[in-house]
Amino acid sequence: MKKIFSNSITYVFLFFGGVFMILPFYWMVATSLKTGAEAIAIPPVWVPETLKFSNYSKALEAAPFGRYFINSLFVTTVTTIGELFTSILAAYAFAKLRFWGKDLLFILLLGTMMVPGELMTIPNFVTLASWRMINTYWALIIPWLASVFSVFTLKQSFESIPDELYYAAKSDGCSDWRFLWEMVVPLSKSSIIAVTILKVIGSWNAFMWPLIVTNERSLRTLPVGLQAFTTEAGTQFELLMAASTIVVVPMVVIYLLLQKYIMQGISRSGLKG
């Protein structure tokens, strides 16, 4: 009886937790289908009286979202590939190679994870400004070509591969480069996919940095483009939510379809709670 009661409490807690997490997404989609009056009504209108799907076409016409989509896709693709390449190489070095100061260097890298990302905004901006890269694609890409979190995650996964396999390959004349790409990477597929998904979602949804380093509309990404619906006269909430839905839904779908790889990759990396 005690176990049944305990399980019931757990399920109730999880149910309300799930509702609490889903509520913002429901509000976003519901508001995207409201009239302007319903979007700002007090008390709030939870279910629109008439579904205005025309808000989506109006939102797409309000700003060059085609260009923003291309920019987001380009930046996300390049930064993801770049981060994966650097993280795989670094993780392999820390996991399998022997060199002086390896443990100390890895601890120092982990220490950087304790520094809030906001504190790095000004140094990164000043550095890129000195290189004359502000308001270019380089400014959107270069700071995100490496990630300590990805290195740490992949290192944990690479270390799970037996050293005997590594030494056997070396004794047969296999180079570290070949062993990495033909053995380590395929055996760590789940962790690599997990890191890739998290990077794609983070890069796609990035707002503050693209807003800071770009001035031209032709360089802006989708999240920054949402500002088109906020003016001195006020905010068109129904159009803003319609555009937000267009931006968010692809990432939500990707996450729902591939979430099992995230769980497999994180659990294999030893980051379970």
Image (cartoon, rainbow, N blue to C red):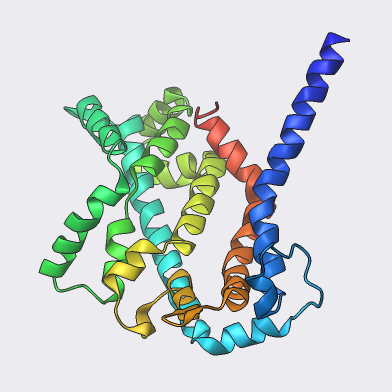
Quadrant including the N terminus: top right
Compare residues 30 and 139 and report the one nearer the observer: 30
**Which residue appears at 72% of the width and 67% of the height?**
30
Residue 269 position, x and y percent, is 50, 32
User: Percent from the top left, x then y, of residue 60?
Assistant: 58, 85
Which residue does the image show at 33% across and 63% down from the upper left?
209
Examine the rendered structure and indicate whether residue 87 appears above or below residue 60: above
Q: Is residue 212 visible?
A: yes
Which residue extends farthest top? 2
Q: Quadrant of the C terminus?
A: top right
Q: Position of residue 230 (x, y in %)?
A: 46, 77
Please name the residue shown 80% across and 21% down the image.
7
Q: Answer with left or right where residue 28 lies relative to residue 171.
A: right
Instruction: Spot the residue most to the left.
Output: 130
Q: Is residue 174 visible?
A: no
Left or right, 178 with reference to 121: right
| Residue positioned most to the right | 1
- Up the image or down, 265 lies above or below 35; here it is above
Q: Is residue 51 above or below residue 3?
A: below
Quarter location, residue 232: bottom left
